[in-house]
Amino acid sequence: MSEPLVSTLFTRHDIYLHALLVENQAWFCAHDLGRLMGKFLDERMSRKLDADQRQMMLVDAHGTAEERLMISESGVYALLVYHYCPEYRLLREWLTHQVIPALRDARPSRSVERPTLSVLDWPKMSLCMLHWQDEPWIRLRDMPCVLTDDPFNQRRSW
């Protein structure tokens, strides 16, 4: 029996998404993706995808190895088109701009000099952080969100 693949856990709107990188390809748990889309994605629903866009994989999730239906990055985009809904634009942007870069940056790098991305998750928000030259960087457009929830900056009036 093969070794289970270790997934990375992402959170969006209190819903977990197990994702992993296999041979530099991003794969996502169909069950978790379905919950994010508000649909039940099972093997039958995934038949719309090509064979190389869906695969059963042994994944280590929550400490136990489980056979899970996984969907490739191109398969996710295809599902978002097949089951079009305007709200999926934000899901696609989150996957494209936060999840996939964080997955790729989490693997060991040959070059230490390049910037890497990580995601900080809090109960009310997620924040993308760039690590470059031993410094964390936050996008300027994210600063108002960070500063409004600063617990140390709350002043009490007399």
Image (spheres, rainbow, N blue to C red):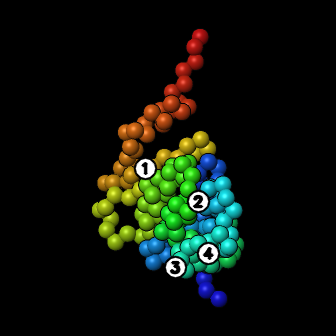
Name the residue beneath numbered marker 3: 52
What is the crowding at mark 1: few (fewer than 14 residues within 10 Å), some, or many (at least 20)? some
Q: Which mark is residue 83?
A: 2
> Depth check: 135 or 12 in front?
12
Name the residue beneath numbered marker 4: 47
Q: Amino acid at mark 3?
A: Asp
Q: Residue at 44% across / 69% down in the picture?
A: 107
| Disc on the earlier residue, 2 or 3 | 3
* Residue 133 picture quarter: bottom left
Q: Amino acid at mark 4?
A: Arg
Question: Which residue, as the protein is rendered here, is positioned at the far top?
Answer: 158
The secondary element bearing badge 1 is classed as strand
| Disc on the earlier residue, 3 or 1 | 3
What is the crowding at mark 3: few (fewer than 14 residues within 10 Å), some, or many (at least 20)? few
Image location of residue 18, percent across then percent down: 60, 64
Q: Residue at 46% across / 73% down in the picture?
A: 25
**Mark pair 2, 1: CA separation:** 31 Å
> Depth check: 21 or 76 in front?
76
| Disc on the earlier residue, 4 or 2 | 4
**Mark pair 3, 1: CA separation:** 32 Å
The secondary element bearing badge 3 is classed as helix
Name the residue beneath numbered marker 1: 129
Q: Which mark is residue 4?
A: none
| Disc on the earlier residue, 4 or 3 | 4
Question: In which quadrant is the C terminus drawn?
Answer: top right
* Residue 49 picture quarter: bottom right
Is label 2 or label 1 in front? 2
| Disc on the earlier residue, 2 or 1 | 2
* Residue 117 picture quarter: bottom left
Relative to residue 35, is residue 119 drawn left or right?
A: left
